[in-house]
Image: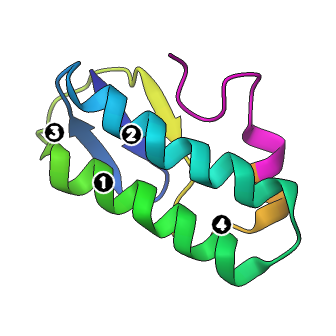
Amino acid sequence: MIVRILGEGQYDLDEAAVDKLNELDAAVESACQGTDEAVFDAALAALLDGVRSLGTAHPVDAIDSSDLILPGPGSTLAEVSEMLGDEGLIPG
């Protein structure tokens, strides 16, 4: 699976990482229900750190479409709330 972090790049992750990322995604989704920017920022940072630590950088010169696109660091609560689907940012 190829995951793109907007403004940063793509990462290759195996399917086993999806369960962990779904846990982190649930925290982002929960934070989007509230108005506390600090809680949201921490949840988004944990999700993006999870992608970076569980994945490996996708070759920069490879032209491959992403399976998932995540908001970049510094995204606002409002921006991410607009990106959320019925299953959060990461389906499954």
Give, as a three-letter code, the residue at label 2.
Leu
- Residue at the spot 83% in from the left edge and 44% down from the top edge: 82
Specify the principal SS of the magenta part. Answer: loop
Q: Where is residue 73 in the image (x, y as percent from the top left)?
A: 51, 69
Q: Front-most of 33 and 10? A: 33
| Residue occupied by mark 2 | 21
Q: How far apart are marks 4 and 3 (CA)?
A: 22 Å
- Residue at the spot 78% in from the left edge and 64% down from the top edge: 77
Give, as a three-letter code, the residue at label 3.
His
Magenta region, residue range: 81-92
User: Which of the two marks, 4 or 3, is nearer to us in this view?
Assistant: 4
| Residue occupied by mark 1 | 50
Q: Is mark 3 on a helix, strand or loop?
A: loop
Look at the picture and state if 49 lies above or below 20.
Answer: below
Q: Do the residues labelled 4 and 1 touch (CB within 8 Å)?
A: no
Give, as a three-letter code, the residue at label 1.
Gly
| First-in-chain label (3 vs 1) | 1
Give, as a three-letter code, the residue at label 4.
Ser
| First-in-chain label (2 vs 4) | 2
Look at the picture and state if 85 lies above or below 58.
Answer: above
At label 3, counting other C-alpha atoms closer than 10 Å, the crowd grade (few under 14, some 14-19, many 20 or more) is some
Residue 60 in view here: no
| First-in-chain label (4 vs 1) | 1
Q: What element carries label 1?
A: helix
Q: Are marks 2 and 1 in contact (CB under 8 Å)?
A: yes
Q: Distance between the residues labelled 4 and 1?
A: 16 Å
| Residue occupied by mark 3 | 58
Q: Is mark 2 on a helix, strand or loop?
A: helix
Residue 16 in view here: yes
| Residue occupied by mark 4 | 75
| In magenta stretch: residue 83 | yes
